[in-house]
Image (tube, grey):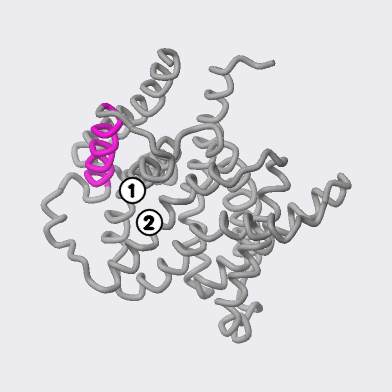
Amino acid sequence: MSHPRFHFVQAHGKVLLFTLLISLSFPIGSALTAVLDPLVVTWARYLLAALTFVILLACQRRLVLPSLRDLGRYTLISLPALCYFVAMFVALQETSALDASALYTTVPLISALASMLIFQRRIGWSMAFALLGGMVAAALIIFRGELSQLASLSLTPSNRIYLLGCVGMALNPILVKRYYRGESFAHLTCWTLICATLLLTLVAAPRLLTTDWQQVSLPLWLGLAYLALFATALSFFLFQQGSVVLQPEQVSAYTYLIPVLVLLIGMLSGEEVIWRQVGWGVLGVLLTMAVMVLVPTRQARRA
């Protein structure tokens, strides 16, 4: 039997890898959505990811049809991320990328508040301050140190739609934790992706019929393969494993790392980063993540 502390370290490592995979997907996603409808890209990545797990489980003779009750459970687990993507595509017709990034920093705090209500548990003052600090630190990176730009952020109809999507994303780790019943994570991820793909097909059907797939070049097909295999299939698998072990606000707080990782990826690709604009934000995010990891560990020891 593995040591409980190692179990938690593994869970943090999996969510960290999930965050890295998502961060690497942004430049690929931008290139794809310049050619294809964003909703079509999302449908394609879900479909290919679901097929990946179907083939994997079928080769291992572990592909089992779930009961109707379990299908309902998997559909519930798939809904938060789907609601987020649909809200994002509707809202981004009018909402700026900057506004969307700023609103997304609310996800960990919303997740903590929802967790308190659903699981009837307190998060503690240190965790609450860490969440607020992380939100401010991420905003410092997004606005390049100019928090005065927050004054220009207003809750327009499109921003309200996107904020509802953020609420959905905040509920994602909570629903995974609440409705996990001990099945293998490969089985859970497979049927969650299948249910999500079926629901997304209903929404995306009109656009799928008018999509010209011939305009997609080979490099973009390779990019779509990355989104499907790594940023969807593997990332969902890692996210769900981490969500079962860690508290929802811990899982959601890793989204604060996304601006930091995007900065580092930009640096590696030759982009100039002005550290006097983002340095305090990066430091704040790293301190937040340290609190997220250490405080629950100490609380567990006392318990």
Residue 261 lies in what quarter of the image? Answer: top left
Residue 301: assigned label: none
Residue 124 lies in what quarter of the image? Answer: top left
Please tell me how crowded label 2 is: few (under 14), some (14-19), or many (20+) other residues with Cα within 10 Å: many
In the rendered image, the residue lying farthest to the front is 120
- The type of residue carrying mark 1 is Ile
Q: Mark 1: which secondary structure? A: helix
| Image location of residue 204, percent across then percent down | 57, 77
Q: Are marks 2 and 1 in contact (CB under 8 Å)?
A: yes
Q: Report which residue position mark 2 lands on.
A: 167
Asked whether residue 138 is drawn in magenta, I would say: yes
Q: CA distance from mark 2 to mark 1?
A: 7 Å
Which quadrant of the figure contains the C terminus? top left
Asked whether residue 100 is drawn in magenta, I would say: no
The residue at the point 47 percent across, 64 percent down is 83
Q: Count how many numbered circles sit on residues in the image.
A: 2
Q: Report which residue position mark 1 lands on.
A: 110
- The type of residue carrying mark 2 is Val
Highlighted magenta segment, given as a residue range: 126-141
**Nearest the camera: 285 or 122?**
122
Q: Is residue 174 left or right of residue 52?
A: left
| Image location of residue 249, percent across then percent down | 39, 39
The residue at the point 62 percent across, 48 percent down is 230
Q: Is residue 156 left or right of residue 239?
A: left
| Image location of residue 112, percent across then percent down | 35, 41
The residue at the point 56 percent across, 65 percent down is 42
Q: Mark 2: which secondary structure? A: helix
| Image location of residue 262, percent across then percent down | 40, 45
Q: Is residue 79 above or below residue 303?
A: below
